[in-house]
Image (cartoon, grey):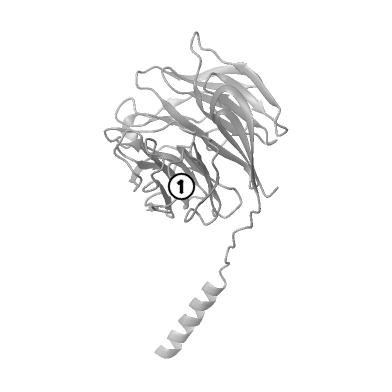
């Protein structure tokens, strides 16, 4: 009887595992990067539109639209009294576009067919907002450095008409010297109602909320930390379980240890990948859509790197320096950097 049971369990297990699909990475024969010069503008805030055009906001207060045909339409320059906003974050709820400036005062603008409205502002010597994203058409989130003993987190639940800052008693306490980097508007990742925020400096942690910012937990990571410019610069999730964090040491960009890690449990635990191997520091990491979480691009001033095995190994595809990347589809992404916008095209 025991032998029969053993044989049955063995055959059942074999059939289950033999029926699992082996996902073979697609063949990418060519990766093309096309550069478009944008004079006198550092660009980190970009948002791909439904028609594949790119809305962008610059360090010198300009709002612009780059068409897929490479036609650039610089719409307007924004002023707040005598202040020129330095935009590093941009997001959309499908109805309106929102741009968020760094520094004091923090200024959050809603853009609607050429009209601009400030929907949130904050004055504080320590204010510095880093990233912004929307869950859906009503609910959005932005995060920044601490002004008290927690991260600055603001939420909207009415489509961006108004925003409220979370009190520190609902957020995990920040560690001494822990903050965030406004490097690429990718300190935030969203999947469904889940949101993850990342930090750096003296501590490099992942903050997770499963309910659009109502409740929070903070998780430790193995990413390099301890100095002002070390830590996590970017996060992305392919689904609610599988994600990646990337960063490193801005002062030692060649360092490729402790700068990239993945999770398979929704961010509770993180495992270093490609440890001691390229790439080193990167400011933005993004999954390629519709590739089962296998294909990932990471960009920074050190160039562009690509993985087709969920981050286990990487290949450098370009020395071109960019701050950020956003995908339109699995064959096309927009890039942005210092005085330039780029188009990354796969297999064409």
- Up the image or down, 73 lies above or below 341; here it is above
Q: Residue 66: where, in percent of width, then height?
A: 66, 29
Q: Quadrant of residue 338?
A: top right
Q: Residue at x 37, y 35 (%)?
A: 251
Give the residue pinned by disc 1: 279
Q: How many marks?
A: 1
Q: Residue 74: where, in percent of width, then height?
A: 65, 21
Q: Residue 326: where, in percent of width, then height?
A: 58, 39
User: Is 257 on the left or on the right of 58, as rendered?
Assistant: left
Is residue 209 among the parts visible in the rendering?
no
User: Is 287 on the left or on the right of 211, as rendered?
Assistant: right
Q: Residue at x 26, y 33 (%)?
A: 176
Quarter occupied by the N terminus: bottom left
Residue furthest to the right in view is: 69
Q: Residue at x 35, y 22 (%)?
A: 126
Q: Nearer the viewer, residue 121 or 178?
A: 178
């Amino acid at each position: 009887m025991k032998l029969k049971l053993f044989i049955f369990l063995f055959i059942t297990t074999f059939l289950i595992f033999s029926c699992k699909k082996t996902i073979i990475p697609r063949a990418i024969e060519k990766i093309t990067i096309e550069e478009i010069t944008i004079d006198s503008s550092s660009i980190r805030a970009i948002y791909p539109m439904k028609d594949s055009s790119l809305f962008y906001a610059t360090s010198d207060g300009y709002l612009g639209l780059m068409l897929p045909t490479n036609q650039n339409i610089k719409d307007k320059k924004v002023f707040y009294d005598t202040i020129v906003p330095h935009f590093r974050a941009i997001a959309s709820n499908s109805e309106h576009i929102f741009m968020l400036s760094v520094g004091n005062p923090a200024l959050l603008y809603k853009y609607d067919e050429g009209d601009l409205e400030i929907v949130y502002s904050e004055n504080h010597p320590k204010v510095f907002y880093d990233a912004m994203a929307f869950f859906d058409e009503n609910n959005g989130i932005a995060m920044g450095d601490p002004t008290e003993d927690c991260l600055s987190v603001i939420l909207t639940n009415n489509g961006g008409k108004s925003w409220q800052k979370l009190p520190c008693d609902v957020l995990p306490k920040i560690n001494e010297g822990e903050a965030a980097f406004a490097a690429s508007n990718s300190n935030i990742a969203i999947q469904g109602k889940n949101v993850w925020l990342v930090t750096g400096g003296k501590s490099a942690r992942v903050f997770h909320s499963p309910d659009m910012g109502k409740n929070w937990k903070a998780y430790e990571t193995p990413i390099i930390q301890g100095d002002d410019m070390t830590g996590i610069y970017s996060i992305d999730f392919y689904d609610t379980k599988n994600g990646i964090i990337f960063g490193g040491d801005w002062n030692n960009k060649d360092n490729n240890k402790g700068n990239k890690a993945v999770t398979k449990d929704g961010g509770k635990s993180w495992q270093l990948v490609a440890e001691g191997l390229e790439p080193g520091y990167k400011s933005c990491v993004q999954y390629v859509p519709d590739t089962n979480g296998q294909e990932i691009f990471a960009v920074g001033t050190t160039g562009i790197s690509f993985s087709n095995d969920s981050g286990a190994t990487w290949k450098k595809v370009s020395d071109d320096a960019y701050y950020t990347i956003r995908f339109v589809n699995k064959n096309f992404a927009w890039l942005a950097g210092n005085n330039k916008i780029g188009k990354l095209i796969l297999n064409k």
